[in-house]
Amino acid sequence: MSDKKMMVNGREIPFAAGETILEAASRYDISIPTLCHLKGTTPHGKCKICVVEIEGERELKTACNTPCNANMVIKTESIKVVADRKKTLEDLIASGNHNCAASSAGNSNWTVFQMAVQQYDKTDDLCPVWGDCKLQDLLYHYQVTQKKPSDRKQPFQKEIVNPLIIRDFSRCILCGRCVSACNEVQVNRAINFGEQDGREKIVTKNNTSLADSDCVFCGECIQACPVGALVEKKAAYQWRPWEVRKIRTTCPYCGVGCQQLLHVKGEKIVKVTGVENGKPNEGRLCVKGRFGYDFIYSDERLKTPLIRENDHFREASWDEALDLVVKRFKQIIASDGPDALAGVSCARSISEDSYQMQKLFRAVFKTNNIDHCART
Amino acid sequence: MTNSFGEFSRAKMFFVIGSNMTEAHPVAATFLKNAVLKGAKLIVVDPRAHRLVDYADLHVPIRVGSDIAFLNGLMNVLIKENLYDRKFVEFNTEEFNSLKQKVSEYPPERAADIAGITPQLIVDTARLLASVKPVMLCYTLGITEHTCGRNNVVSTANLQMLLGNMGVECGGVNPLRGQNNVQGACDMGALPNVFPGYQAVVDEKARKKFEAFWNVSDLPSQNGLMMPQMMDGLVSGKIKGFYIFGENLASTEPDIHKVEHELSCAEFLVCQDIFLNETTKFAHVVLPAAAWSENDGTFTSSERRVSRVRTASPPPGEAKPNWWIFKEIARRMGQTWSSNSAKEIWNNEISMLAPALAGIKYHRIEGDGLQWPCPTEEHPGTAYLHKEGQFTRGKGAFIPVEWTPPAEVPDEQYPLVLSTGRRLYHYHTRTQTGRCEGLNDLLGEETADISREDATALNILDGEKIKVSSRRGEVMVKARVTPEVPRGLVWMAFHFREANANFLTNAAFDPFTLTAEYKACAVRIEKL
C-alpha cells in the first residue's frame, strides 16, 4: 500500500497505485452500489449506478473504473449522486419488464398497470427472482417506484429452447455482467454485446440460441445476472429466497473440489451456485457442478437391500441382507482363508467411507485385498 | 498435485500434456485461461486439438503413446543446449548422469520420428519451455492410462526437475485427478499396500501401530491384490467373495466382455450402490447406500484439499450411509467400532492415524478446507510440496526411462488407434448425470470422433452410424467427423452403454501400477 491518500465521505483513506475508487472504498467498507461491475473483470462503467461526486469535477464519475488520485475529495451519497442514481434506476425500470415495482405503482391506475405488465410478461407470476434481485434491492433502497407501464418496444423473444437456461430479454438491463462472466471469468466466449433490429442485445455469435452456439452451459452468466434475465430452467418458479436454506458442500464430480452452495427448500435441492470467494473455485462452477444434482431424487434410487433369487432380486430387510453377507464371507474365510475375499472401494464417496471399508477388510476380514479405481 | 489451483491464475507458463482440461476439469481450465489472457504462455501436448489448443502458443500433436520419446527428446535438447537449471540439478537432485546418458539416445530426429512430429518442433518446445521460469506442468489420464503410465509420470518429473521447476509456486508436477475423492480414497488406504496415510502394510511398526489403535491382532503382513488381479482371481478361483462399493466395473473396466465373464465367476458378489447398474446384474446381494448430498463427510481434491460435504436431505427409503453399513458388518463379525458419524471417524481415527492429516479436524474445515500435509492443529496446511527443492527422500532422483510402444499397435487388420476419455456433459457411466434433467439433451449418445481424412477415405459422413471393432468387440456408433482428431485416430468416451468404448479397449496393464491402457488400442472402422 502506498502512502497516497484521499478523502471519502470525510474520511481519509489510503489507496494503492492503479486502484479504482470502488476498490479502495470497498476495502474500508464504504459501500457504493454496483450493477454492471463483476469482481475480477474489466470495469466499464456502463450502468452508471456507482457514480460518485468528486470535488472540482463537473460531472459525476463512475467509481468502478475511475482510478484514485491523491487528494481527491469524494462523496458517495451526496444529493447530486442520489438524484442521479434515482434517474438511472427510473430509466432501468422503464427499459424492461420489472413488475416487482407493480405494487408500488400507487394510485388509482394500479389495475391498469398490473394488467399491462401481465399482458407484456405473458405470465401471471412475479419475476422469478423477486426477492433475489440487485435491481429490486436498489429500487427499494432509493425508493424508486414505477409510475406507469413503460412505453417499450416489443421485447426480444424469450429463449427457452435450450434445456438449462432461460433467457428473458424483457428483464435484461444490458449491464453486461453475463458478458464479463462468459468472456473474462470462464473464458468460453459464447456471448457478447450485439444488436438485433437496431437495438442492443446480448447475443451469441450470429445471434443463435445458446444450444446452437459455443455455450457450454456452465451457467456462470446466471450467477452473474443481477436481475431475472437469466435463470436456471430447473429452478425457475420453484423457490423464493426466503424459503431456502443455503448449505455449503463440495461438488461430487471431478477432482477440482469446487465449493457449492446448495439452495435447499424443505428437503430438496432446488438450485446450486458457486461459493463466492471460496477456494478453489472462487464462485465458479461447470455444467455438471451447477446442473448435475437431481440424480439424488431419481425414482430409480435403491431403497431397500436386495437379495438374488434365481434370475431376479427380491427386497430384503437390512438384518436379513447383512446376516447373509456375514454368513457367506465367514464361510469363505473358513474354507479358503481371508485372502479369498477382495473388495473395491469408491472414489466418489466420502473419505470416511473408504476408511471404514479398508478397516473392515484389514481389521475384521484380515486381508489386504482392498483397492479402488485409482489405477483405472 | 504438488501445487494448487489457486496458483493457476498467477502462473507464467503451462505445459499441459495428456489433459483435456476444458472438458474433464472445466473450472481448473478457466483459471488457466485467465492466466493466458493475462499473458501466460501455454504449451499443449496432445494428439487431439481439443479446446485448450485455441489458447495455446504451441500445440504439439504427438502420436498416442509416444510421450516418453517426446519428453526424452525435449530433455536431450535442454541438456545439449545448456538450457536446464544447473544449480537445481547440482544441489537438489541425483543421478543426473544416468538421465543424461539415457536422453542422449533420443536426439530430436529420433524422438520426432517416434512422436510423429518434426524435430524442429521438439527444439522449439524445449527452447520455449526454458525461456520462462517457473513452468507449471499439468497432466491427466493421457499420461497414466498406458502400459508405460508409470514411466510417463517419471518422465514428467524428470523434466520438471531438470528445469528446476519443483518446490516453487506456480511450478510442479500436477496430475488433475479424475474423481472428486480419488485422492481421499488413496489417502484412506483403500489400496492393497498401505494403511491410511500411506503407511506400508509390510512394515511391522506400522502394523503394530494399527493393531494397537484398532485393538486387533494379526493384521495381514503381505500386500494384497490390485483390482485387475482380483478380477483374474475371480476366474482362477483364488477370489471367492467380492465386495464392490460404488463402482460400475462392468462398464468402466477395459474389455467389457472379459470383465463380465470375470464378474459372473464370483461365488458371492456384494454390490453397495445408489442405483442398479451393469455391475449389479452379477450381484448376489445389493446394499442401498446414501449418496453425495445425503452424507456428512469429506472429499479430498487433486490439490490435497480436505473439504466438507454436507447433508441436504436424508437418503431415500431404507438406504444407509456407507460407513454405517461397514460398521454394521464389523459388528456382526464380532468387532464393535465406537465412531458413530463421519465426523467421529475423521476426528477420532483418521487424523490420529495419518500423520499428514493430524492437524485437520472438522472444526478447522468449516470454510475453505485444508491442504495436507497438515501435521499439527496450528499448521496452516501446505499449498505446494517440496519447498526449496527438498524432496521427501532428500534429493530428487532422476530415473531414466526408455520409450515403449503401446501393447497393441495398428496393423493391417486394425489400422487405427482408439483412444478414450471423458466428455463435458457426462460423467463416467452416466449413473448420475444420465439422471439429471437437461444433461442428456446436451449429449444424448456416444460418438466415434474421427478425422476428416479417414472419413473421406471411407466415405463416411458426419453423423452416420458406423461400426468400430477391435480384437475384443464391436460397437455401432455415430461418426463425429472433426478437425480435433488427427488422421489415424478414433476417439470415444465410455458414458453410454450402447456404444461404450470399453467393449473395444485393451486389458493390458502397466507392470508397476496395473493401470490399463485405455488410451491406446487398435481398431477398425467400417461404413455400414
Image: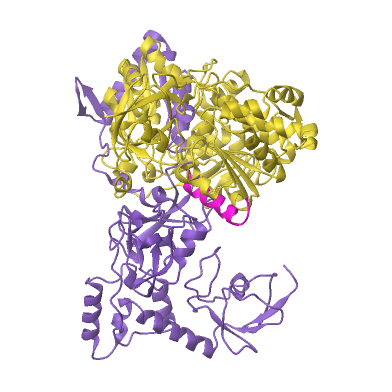
Chain for colour purple: A
Q: Colour of chain B?
A: yellow
Residue B320 position within the rendered picture, expressed as x and y whole percent measured from the top left: 33, 37
Which x, y percent locates residue A225? 42, 66
x 70%, y 28%: residue: B393
- Display colour scheme: by chain
Quadrant of residue A329 within the rendered picture: top left
Q: Nearer the viewer, residue B132 or B340?
A: B132
Q: Nearer the viewer, residue A132 or B374?
A: A132
Looking at this view, is B146 or A63 the one in front? Answer: B146
**Is A33 positioned to the left or the right of B389 in the image?**
left
Number of disc labels: 0
Q: Quadrant of the C terminus of chain B?
A: top left
User: Does residue B335 show up?
Assistant: no
Quadrant where the N terminus of chain B is found in the figure:
top right
Rendering coords of residue B57 (x, y %): 60, 47
Residue A217 in sight here? yes
Q: What residue is shown at x 75% (from left), y 26% (from top)?
A: B96
Left or right relative to A268: residue B99: right
> Is the stretch drawn in magenta largely helix, strand or loop?
helix
Percent from the top left, x then y, of residue B49? 49, 41
B46 or A337: which is nearer to us? Answer: B46
Which residue corresponds to the image point at 31% horizontal and 76% vertical from the top-left? A97
The part of the chain drawn in magenta is B25-40
Q: Is residue A328 magenta?
A: no
Instruction: Name the image quarter holding residue B125.
Output: top right
Relative to B239, is B392 on the left or the right?
right
Q: Is residue B478 left or right of residue A135?
A: left
Instruction: Please tell me whether residue B250 is drawn above or below residue B240 in the rendered image.
Output: below
